[in-house]
Image: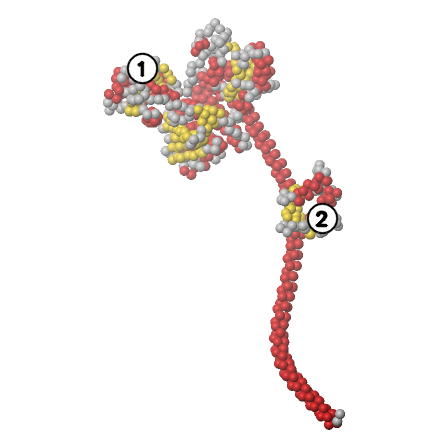
Amino acid sequence: MKIEDILAQERRARMAAERLLAQKQAELTNANRVLSKHALTLSDEIMETRVAVEEIKGENSQVRADLERANKEVVIAKRRLWDSLETIEDGFAVFDQNDKMIAANSAYLEPFDGLSCVTPGIPYTDILHIATDEGIVDIGDMRPLAWRDMMLDRWRAPSCDPVVLRLWDGTHIKLVDRRSRDGDMVSLGLNITETIKYQAELSDARHRAEAANRAKSAFLANMSHEIRTPMNGVVSMAEIMADGDLDDEQRLFVNTIRQSGEALLTIINDVLDYSKIEAAKMTLQPEPFDLERVILDVVTLLQPAAQEKGIQLILDFDLFMPSKFLGDVVRIRQILTNLIGNAVKFTSEGHVLVRAIGLPLGECDEQKVHITVEDSGIGIPEDMQSHIFGEFNQVDTERNRKFEGTGLGLAITSQLVELMRGEIWVESQEDVGSCFGFHITLPVEETVEPPKLPQNPGTVVLAMEDRLNRAILEKRLEATGLRTALFDPLNTDAALVRDAYLILVDEQCSAKARNRGDQCLIQTFRSQNPTAPIYFLTAPHSTAAKQSQDAALATRVLQMPLIRSTVFEIINQVGTHSSNKSADMLEAGSDAPLLLSKADRSGFRKMRILAAEDNKTNQLVFTKLLKELDMDLRFANNGIEAVEAFLDFQPDIIFMDISMPEMDGKEATRRIRTLEQDQGMDKTRVVALTAHALTGDDREILAHGLDQHLTKPLKKPEILHEILANCPDDARCPLPGNCC
Ligand code: ADP
């Protein structure tokens, strides 16, 4: 090749290389420019990032500081928590889901006495093993395996009941374990040694107190017996003396002895009753009873005291009330005696009115019995009205102080009413009077059928001056559908008397006519109306009225208060128009005459009466009380003699003292009953005579085979009643002249 070609070739190559170089330089410049732009952007970004990093750096150190502080706080809180857990005397431990101990305080670990294996990580089952193997827990009669199984069953039960463990040294630990939501078990071991000790002391103290209370009741019962026995002698002897020939002054002394003795006996009974309620020993003994009879008995008992003071004691008994209820009659009588007794005691003129109303309770066989006792006595200041229901509380005023009493009556009464789930209240105004009321709900045992009136019953004329009794009678008669009209001597139309179907005349009205100088009132009525029955109403025990001309002319003499059956009899008379002039006496509360068939049996043997009584005074009282009786009376000084006398004397009736030396009356009666059974003899009536005042004793006594229970002081009518009611057919009546 030619040089020029080669040179041209080289020149072209060189020029191509120069062009390539220029192009590469241009590209490089361009790339440099892009690069520097990018570097610029990068440096901007770096600047920004640096700022951001600085910011984050600040935040980070804040977080770290916070974290450090939080950590510190956690440590403090944890330390405090453990300090607290260590401070409490009760054990605390936490177990994980696999029943391994996570942590426990020293109190929890203390019983294990530093055993190094009892530490976090130990399984619960190992703890149980250590507890039995080392004798830490007193497991009593249980075998260790059984005890551990019992503890494990409890630990795994869905709800784990607390359990009390007794440790070897007498410490009592109550274990309370609870599973948390994440499956851990929190275990508390409460040291209840002091509580157990306190409980034991308390129960010991309670037993001692109960024993002391029983001893107190027994002491009271014994003391009452000891006090009552001689007191009964005093009261009975005074009663016998009062029957004898005494001048006025002697009679006053004798009566004072008797009354004081009776008052003392009442106080003893009150104290006894109260202590019995206090000791919560009083339980109610429901039995069927006739409420009207009970009220009437109490009224009859208090009638002499009321008459002595010249006040009227009136009874208004709901005619339609059931005849029998179920209740504790002894306690109901006690409530009534207290309320009516107080009313008579605190009233010097006017009246005491006892009202009894029954309110049926829906469909059920129960009635709300509502009894009020209203008096026109001294009244009770308003601020004292709730005070008097407290024990030993009385109204402390000059006027009140002259009345005797313990202040226990109303306390006992209100507690008895409360025991019967009833209510008691009082309304009173000083110088006007008081009204005590109570209600109790009682089941009905028997209802009464009121009498049926004829179609057109006619009018009953009431010639009565006794306004209160008249109002009550009027209300009772009208409640049955009868018409009544009042007789006024100055104003009454003669036709009213002439057409009357029945005429009732009270003692006061006839006395008023007599005082006016009129003819005997009943005679006047009889002449005006010869056919209508005329009833003469007398005050209780009014002998003069019963012996008066009115009584002789009347169809019948009725004693107030009229019992329900008498009112029904009166109503039945309406329309019969029969006039029976026999003037028979119908006494409120008296029973039918006894033993009429036994009259005139002078040819028969004497009745044989055995009295088992160790107390010579009581023997004397017994002899004196029955001195007029025609009978053979023998005494036995103790139970053994009584059983012997039962066999050889063959008494018709035995009066049996309960507390006697050697053999008491209960044991003697039991032996007599066995003898009767063994020898196929008839049952002899055995009547307990006791000084026991605690109510409920009578039931206990009767459970030994006795037939009846009478409390001392001996009362002649009660003893006489027993003797006459049990006079056998082959014996003559022991009453003087055999005139039973
Ligand atoms: P006691 O009659 O033995 O004092 P009570 O507890 O029966 O005890 O009565 C307490 C007191 O209540 C009586 O002392 C008397 O002050 C007052 N009191 C009770 N009943 C009546 C009444 N009917 N009229 C006036 N005061 C009464």
User: Where on the picture, by quarter, is residue 356?
Assistant: top left
- At x 43%, y 21%, the residue is 252
Residue 310 horizontal/vertical position (percent)? 37, 25
Query: Which residue was labeled with disc 2?
Result: 123
Residue 78 horizontal/vertical position (percent)? 65, 56
Label whose residue precedes the other's in the sequence (1 or 2): 2
Query: Which residue was labeled with disc 1?
Result: 579
Res. 625 in view? no
Q: Please state, as top left, top right, bottom left or bottom right, where the C terminus lies in the image.
A: top left
Q: Amino acid at mark 1?
A: Ser
Circle 2 residues within 10 Å: few <14, some 14–19, many ≥20: some
- At x 74%, y 92%, the residue is 6
The dot on residue 174 is none
Q: Residue furthest bottom?
A: 4
Q: Please state, as top left, top right, bottom left or bottom right, where the N terminus lies in the image.
A: bottom right
Viewed as shown, does residue 218 lie left or right of 584? right
User: Where on the picture, by quarter, is residue 475?
Assistant: top left
Q: Which sits in the foreground, 593 or 27?
A: 27
Above or below: residue 35 compared with residue 267: below
Q: Amino acid at mark 2?
A: Pro
